Each structure stands twice: as structure tokens, then as C-alpha cells.
Image (cartoon, rainbow, N blue to C red):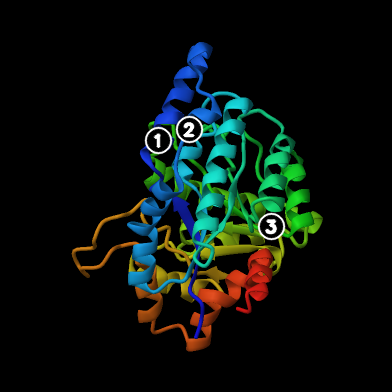
Amino acid sequence: MSLIIDCHGHYTTAPKALENWRNAQIAGIKDPAAMPKVADLKISDDELRESIETNQLKLMKERGSDITLFSPRASFMAHHIGDFNVSSTWAAICNELCYRVSTLFPDHFVPVAMLPQSPGVDPATCIPELEKCVKEYGAVGINLNPDPSGGHWTSPPLTDRHWYPIYEKMVEYDLPAMIHVSTSCNACFHTTGAHYLNADTTAFMQCIQGDLFKDFPTLKFLIPHGGGAVPYHWGRFRGLAQEMKKPLLEDHLLNNIFFDTCVYHQPGIDLLNTVIPVKNVLFASEMIGAVRGIDPTTGHYYDDTKRYIEASKILSGDDKHQIYEGNVRRVFSRLDSRLKAKGL
């Protein structure tokens, strides 16, 4: 019997006090006298428990998943707001809340860290927060935003040496990064319907164009939301790589890049698992996330992705075990160590 490990969860249901504090922080950018102190945010353990028990944990039990890798709400990262100090304070607050959730529900939630990124700022500034989250909070991965500008794409490609300080730490701690943008402040790109999927596709194409994994052969990227357009246009990407005289994608990228199952209909999941090797697919739902409604054609929540895996006529029992547990533990080695320490 597989553990069902959801590798893509965000704290989208945090108590309202968090959003209120953030709004005060944003107001304080223009009026420093109004800038709230970290100590001004008071959220009790009971409030955290209620926010999880009535939302994520309730749905996990209903849908039959066991563990969620839990990071701060992606759209709340908003790295384009303020300067590095604003991002640093905000990231520390959000990461601590996810850590507290993991201590209140240690059998069900494991922390993944957001980084205090800021447009135009050296990514090396993120390292203290990254190290704190690994060493003090037990974080098993990070979320890396390839576009801290919020839809304007002012950062270099992920293959650029600009990012190497983060990659060096990822390799040192064997931390995978989920490549995940935040809110779009560009009206051309709807945050979850366009900007997220654009970024997933863009990140993959950037990796095709470069040779990043020659420098970092053990680096691991998780491209969420089923890889954006990647599985659907696999032939295009294979052809482009061939024209660029790159190795076959299986050799060039698939030892280092993985995709999750946040694809919200059966044909999409079937396509993902037809095109992408099983070893590169990790179970995820991003529940209570971008798509929260019920599909009128099935009567079930769009983001109940376990149903699609179970209904697959393509995947064997062993394939499903790899997607639910085996691949997640292999990619998130720190999670694997944590589970082994519990006898799991």
C-alpha cells in the first residue's frame, strides 16, 4: 500500500490576520511610520489548527492522501512588492507559519520554503532564509520564482550564472526546487490561468537552451501544473532541441526535471502519463488552490487529482505506487530520510 504524498500544497487558508498584516506591510512601504512589526502578527496554535482541520486536512482524509509538502501561498509571495527587506520579513513570517503547521500535524504536513527573492537583487541574499528553513524547520525543498518581477521577466534565464548561488545550496542540501511564479502584476497575464502555465513552459524551454545540468548534475527541478504546455507540445520541444544540437531530452533534461499531476481533467492526466516517463511524474493536487470548484461533468472537485490517477487505464499498479510515493521520496531525499526515521 503506497503512502499518498502530495508534493504541491500551499497554505492558502491561513488565518485572516496574516493577510491583514501583509496589507499593513505594503502600506508601510510608502509610510514607514505605518510599517508593522513582526511581533504585531499574533496567530495562535488553535487558529492554525482550525484553518487546517476544516480545510486541507479534511479534504486529505476525504480524498485519501496522507502527507502534503506544504509551502506558503504562491500568489502571496509577491516578490515584486517592496525591496529585499520587505520580501525577507514576509518570507520569514510565512515560512514560520508552515513550520508551525508541520509541528501541529507532524504526520500530515512537511515544510517547503519560499525564498525572499526581490527583482534585481542577487539571489545569494536568499541563502540565510534557505539555510534556516532547512536546519531549523526541516524544510525538504524550496520554491524558486524564475520571475520575481511579477510577469515582466526581468531576471536572466534559469540557466544563467545569476542563479548559481541558489543551485550550489540546493546541491549541498539535496533540495529540489519547485519552479513556481507568484502573482502577475502584468494585465496581459492572468495569474493562475496564464502566468503560472507560461512560467512552467518557459522554465522548461530555458533548460533546453542551456546546459545547466552539466554544471549541476544532481540539481532537481519540479515543474508544476503538469509542466504547463510541455507534455502537449513534446514533439515541438524534441524538435527544437534537435535543431539546437542538444542531446535527446531523455538525456538532456529528464534526469533532473520532474512534473507534478496538478492537471485537472482525465484527458490531461492521461496525456501527461502517455508522454512523460513515469519516473518523472510526482503526485500533487495543489488543493484549495487555483481551481477550487466542482466539475459539473463529473460531480467531483477539479483538484481531486487522485481520482484521475486511480481511473487511469495507462498506469500499472507499480506505476501508481511510483507516482504516489516512490518518485516523491526519490526526488525529495530529505523527506525520504524523515519518513525512514519514522519507520515508514
On the image, the x and y values in percent for residue 283 come to 49, 69
Residue that appears at 37% across and 59% down: 53
Relative to 199, say whether 284 is above or below: below
Circles 3 and 1 in contact, beta carbons < 8 Å: no
The answer for how far apart the CA atoms under marks 2 and 3 are is: 30 Å
The dot on residue 175 is: 3
On the image, the x and y values in percent for residue 149 come to 54, 32
Going from N to C along the chain, the mark reached first, 1 or 2, is 1
Relative to 160, say whether 331 is above or below: below
Q: Amino acid at mark 3?
A: Leu
Residue that appears at 72% across and 46% down: 131
Residue that appears at 72% across and 32% down: 122
The dot on residue 102 is: none
Relative to 125, say whether 171 is above or below: below
Q: Secondary structure at mark 1?
A: helix
On the image, the x and y values in percent for residue 236 come to 53, 60
The quarter of the rendered structure image containing the C terminus is bottom right
Circles 1 and 2 in contact, beta carbons < 8 Å: yes
The answer for how far apart the CA atoms under marks 3 and 1 are is: 31 Å
| Crowd class of label 3 (few under 14; some 14 to 19; many from 20; radius 10 Å) | many
Q: Is residue 224 visible?
A: no
Going from N to C along the chain, the mark reached first, 2 or 3, is 2
Q: Nearer the viewer, residue 40 or 236?
A: 40
Q: Secondary structure at mark 3?
A: loop
Relative horizontal placement of residue 342, taking residue 47 as reference (left or right): right
Residue that appears at 28% across and 63% down: 301
The dot on residue 17 is: 1
Q: Tell me the residue that label 2 is attached to.
A: 41
